[in-house]
């Protein structure tokens, strides 16, 4: 009897079928006793390749494993369960997987209950899962991108049936809410706003691996963002393959600009989004970005090529001129913006002239950084069937492009010197623990000397020395003051403090309370003026009556109670800081 159970296999053709209304599912949080027994005191390890969507999938899979009692390890050798989360966008990421799978044979030989799960985009490619399962007997489960929410039921099925399962569903896709997650950073969070992509750029595998474009409901996104704010997160990055088409599937006038504005209003200190599709970047978006100070002035704006000819073969829905015009509008409204981009060189049929157009575009836009890729054919995509550019020409163009990009990156870095930027501190650098690193609000990497207790704080840093890929800075404020501001911000998020502030605000604006205050002033005045006269006892009683009325007023009482709770909280914090 075969040890392999094939439940479903990748089918790139099926993945392209659109559905009008995607199925919406709410995770019920249930787990079987068998899984709880398996997970108890066990360790998992996850290795993720590729983009932010994959990183977010890792956080969610970690959340599921945590639900059955497992703990994360960063040491692959001690893992009882490992997940390799694959990326299909670029070839070198794909090649690395095979070596990685091989390395887990040792875990299996040490521990026959070891489970290896292969997930991610590569599994959505026709034929890959079957081949892997047949080659490596220590793989327990293969899932595609759509089955991240089904990780636990599928693991349960592996345990129950004692079979190795392939479950790769290729289809338009669902929207699942209420998924658990173990976020990688306590300060920076990714929030999915939509899944899949409908653009079908001719080089790109994503629409085949992640399905058709479908938006999460705005209320679900806002709830997740509000929770992150309440938990003290400092930065949210909204994620979608194409954020600018967010909400269009609802056909009710919802746009990404609406969502972005609503998230900005949650008060998250820094807000970013990825990835923008140039021709869908509306004027409304530019307005919203410029209006809210917590939306950072960094924009990843992938052009892919500077030649209208090539853009058309890529299926990109804009010309070079249209792209330049939108970028011009963005820069006019936000002169301090850092624009970054993705560029593919050596796309099929790209001529020297086309390539020169890309070089001239880069010089014209002056990107602050760019990710450059040599075109690599993705099986099943239209460009893979086009006439390819010889490899040596691709490499030669890649090197020339890199030199131009380095030039503009260096120029952008140099233009920042002398200015002060807000930096969200990621922590001490790997090489020197006295040097902190973080990103400026325009996306540039900054290193500066400072104490590691500033990790997770937003601090003001002056740029002093520019290098191509980073800038050396120095703290532009006392680190203790920066930390104190951070603590004050976190205190302001405490539910008791928030309740106290709300009530205080209500009372300040209440006519009834104002009248009560006026009454007290008047009664006191009468009492003082009548001192020594026969009216004094009754004036004194009037005054005491008003005092009692104030003492017994339910809202004022409530404020007093809350204020003593706030005081206790501050005393506790003071004691901790001592
Ligand atoms: N070859 C090279 N680069 C690619 N990208 C996507 N598909 C390919 C491919 N087949 C690049 C694009 C995209 C980025 C995430 O990866 O520039 O914006
Ligand atoms: Fe791929 Fe184009 Fe969609 Fe981006 S917009 S994910 S490049 S198909």
Image (tube, helix red, strand yellow):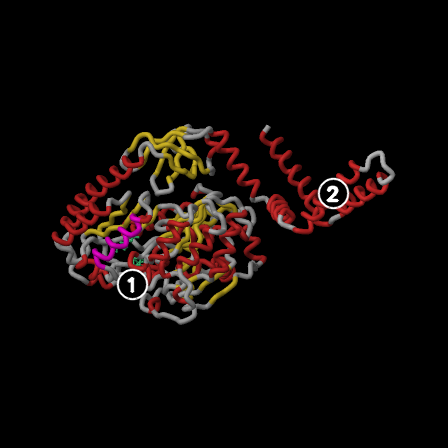
Q: Quick one: label 1 or label 2, which is nearer the N terminus?
A: 1
Question: Is 166 above or below relative to 93?
Answer: below
Report the side of 559 relative to 284 (left or right): right
C-alpha distance separating marks 1 and 2: 76 Å
In front: mark 1 or mark 2?
Answer: 2
Pointer 1 local density, CA inside 10 Å: few below 14, some 14–19, many at least 20: some
At mark 1, the secondary structure is loop
Count of labels shown? 2
Residue at disc 1, CB closer than 8 Å to ligand 2? yes
Report the side of 564 relative to 434 (left or right): right
Residue at the disc numbered 1? 200
**Residue in the picture at 80% in, 42% down:** 544
Q: Quadrant of residue 537?
A: top right
**Residue in the picture at 84% in, 38% down:** 536
Report the side of 267 relative to 92 (left or right): right
**Residue in the picture at 33% in, 40% down:** 444
**Residue in the picture at 22% in, 61% down:** 383
Choose between 403 and 1: the one closer to the eye.
Answer: 403
**Which stretch appears magenta?**
319-332
At mark 2, the secondary structure is helix
Q: Quadrant of residue 259?
A: bottom left
Choose between 416 and 185: the one closer to the eye.
Answer: 416
Residue at the disc numbered 2? 522
Choose between 186 and 430: the one closer to the eye.
Answer: 186
Give the number of the disc on residue 147. Answer: none
Choose between 303 and 259: the one closer to the eye.
Answer: 259
Residue at disc 2, CB closer than 8 Å to ligand 2? no
């Amino acid at each position: 009897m075969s040890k392999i159970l094939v439940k479903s296999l990748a089918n790139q053709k099926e993945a392209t079928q659109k559905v009008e209304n995607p199925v919406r599912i709410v995770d019920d949080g249930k787990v079987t006793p068998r899984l709880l027994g398996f997970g108890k005191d066990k360790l998992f390890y996850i290795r993720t390749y590729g983009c932010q969507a994959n990183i977010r999938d890792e956080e969610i899979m970690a959340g599921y494993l945590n639900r059955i009692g497992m703990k994360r390890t960063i040491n692959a050798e001690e893992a009882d369960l490992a997940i390799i989360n694959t990326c299909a966008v670029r070839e070198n990421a794909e090649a690395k997987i095979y070596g990685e799978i091989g390395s887990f044979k040792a875990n299996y030989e040490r521990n026959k209950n070891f489970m290896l799960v292969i997930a991610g985009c590569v599994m959505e490619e026709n034929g890959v899962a079957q081949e892997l399962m047949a080659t490596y007997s220590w793989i327990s489960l293969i899932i595609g991108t759509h089955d991240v929410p089904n990780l636990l039921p599928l693991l349960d099925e592996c345990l129950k049936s004692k079979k190795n399962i392939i479950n790769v569903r290729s289809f338009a896709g669902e929207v699942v809410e209420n998924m658990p997650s173990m976020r990688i950073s306590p300060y920076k969070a990714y929030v999915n706003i939509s899944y899949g992509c409908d653009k079908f750029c001719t080089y790109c595998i994503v629409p085949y691996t992640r399905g058709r474009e479908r938006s999460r409901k705005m209320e679900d996104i806002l709830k997740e963002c509000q929770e992150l704010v309440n938990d003290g997160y400092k930065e949210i990055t909204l994620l979608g393959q194409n954020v600018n088409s967010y909400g269009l599937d609802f056909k009710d006038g919802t746009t990404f600009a609406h969502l972005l504005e609503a998230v900005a209003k949650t008060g998250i200190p820094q807000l970013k989004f990825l990835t923008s599709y140039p021709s869908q970047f509306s004027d409304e978006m530019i307005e919203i970005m410029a209006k809210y100070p917590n939306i950072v002035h960094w924009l990843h704006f992938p052009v892919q090529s500077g030649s209208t000819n090539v853009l058309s073969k890529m299926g990109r829905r804009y010309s070079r001129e249209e792209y330049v015009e939108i970028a011009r509008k963005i820069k006019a409204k936000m002169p301090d913006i850092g624009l970054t981009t993705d560029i593919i060189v050596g796309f099929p049929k790209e001529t020297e002239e086309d390539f020169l157009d890309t070089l001239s575009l880069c010089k014209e836009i002056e990107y602050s950084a760019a990710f450059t890729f040599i075109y690599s054919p993705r099986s099943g995509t239209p460009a893979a069937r086009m006439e390819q550019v010889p490899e040596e020409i691709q490499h030669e163009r890649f090197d020339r492009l890199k030199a131009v990009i380095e030039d503009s990156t260096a120029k952008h870095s140099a233009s920042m010197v002398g200015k002060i930027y807000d930096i969200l501190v990621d922590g001490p650098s790997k090489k020197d623990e006295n040097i902190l690193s973080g990103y400026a609000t325009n996306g540039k990497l900054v290193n500066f000397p400072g104490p590691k207790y500033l990790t997770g704080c937003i601090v003001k840093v002056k740029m002093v020395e520019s290098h191509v890929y980073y800038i050396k800075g120095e703290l532009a404020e006392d680190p203790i003051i920066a930390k104190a501001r951070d603590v004050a911000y976190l205190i302001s998020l405490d539910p008791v403090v928030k309740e106290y502030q709300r009530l205080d605000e209500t009372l300040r604006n209440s006519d009834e309370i104002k009248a009560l205050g006026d009454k007290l002033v008047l009664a006191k005045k009468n009492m003082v003026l009548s001192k020594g006269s026969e009216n004094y006892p009754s004036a004194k009683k009037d005054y005491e009556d008003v005092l009692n009325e104030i003492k017994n007023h339910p809202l004022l009482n409530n404020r007093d109670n809350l204020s003593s709770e706030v005081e206790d909280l501050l005393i506790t914090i003071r004691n901790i800081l001592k």
